[in-house]
Image (cartoon, helix red, strand yellow):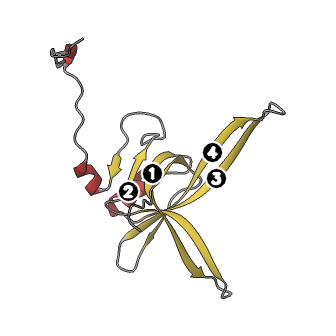
Amino acid sequence: MAGSVNKVILIGNLGRDPEIRTMQNGDKVANLSIATSERWRDKASGEQQERTEWHRVVVFDPQLVGVVEKYLKKGAKAYLEGELQTRKWTDQSGVEKYSTEVVLRRFRSSLVMLDGRGGSSGGDEPQIEGEREQRSRPAMKGPAKGGADLDDDIPF
């Protein structure tokens, strides 16, 4: 279908330590369990309510798997971009089952640690994105000191 988009963006916390596996071809894969929560105050009772949704995330990008393996632990907050994928499999008793996951592949995904390396907030966290996205985004530059880059031809 032309004009369709399969994009998932999550900001959440890891519910457990990442599971790192090695495939037959030697590539590593990371499995994550990410929790996103919504909070609101119930209008009738005035009580604080919360609903948590759990998301299965599979990371295939070797660069991102390295970051996950080295830095992410249970409780870490992360920003993830990937695509939704449903796969069909058969369990041990022969019953067909379906699993829907957020998949991070090379060139179409990104991962940003929001807690920093040691679990504390800070600016030292690695920000890794798929290679295509890194190349396609222009570098952002801030204004020069003192605002000297203002255009004087503005009519007001």
Kindly report the distance in space between the C-alpha atoms of the residues bearing marks 2 and 1.
Answer: 7 Å
Q: Are marks 2 and 4 in contact (CB under 8 Å)?
A: no
Front residue of 52/16: it is: 52
For label 1, the SS is strand
Count the marks: 4
CA gap, disc 2 and disc 4: 22 Å
Q: Which mark is residue 109?
A: 2
Q: Identify the mark nearer the N-term, 2 or 4.
A: 4
- In the image, 74: left or right of 150? right
**Mark 4 / mark 1, whichever is N-terminal:** 4
Considering only order in the chain, which callout, 1 or 2, is on the residue closer to the N terminus?
1
Q: Residue at x 20, y 16 (%)?
A: 154
Q: Amino acid at mark 2?
A: Ser
Q: How much space separates mark 3 and mark 4, taking CA atoms?
A: 6 Å
Towards the viewer: 98 or 17: 98
Name the residue carrying label 3.
Answer: 53
Cα separation, mark 1 vs mark 3, equals: 15 Å
- Given the image, on which type of amino acid does mark 4 rest? Ser
Mark 1 residue type: Leu
Q: Which residue lies at the image location 47% right of the left edge and 36% below the top edge?
A: 120
Q: Which residue is mark 4?
A: 37
Residue farthest to the bottom, as pictured: 94
Residue 28 location, quadrant: bottom left
Label 2, secondary structure: give it. loop
Please identify the quarter of the rendering in which residue 63 is found: bottom left
Q: Earlier in the sequence, mark 1 or mark 3?
A: 3
Return the x and y of residue 27 as percentages of the image width and height.
36, 72
Mark positioned earlier in the residue sequence (3 or 4) = 4
Contact (Cβ within 8 Å) of mark 3 with mark 4: yes
Q: Position of residue 34 (x, y in %)?
A: 56, 53
Q: Residue 153 in the image: x percent, y percent? A: 15, 16
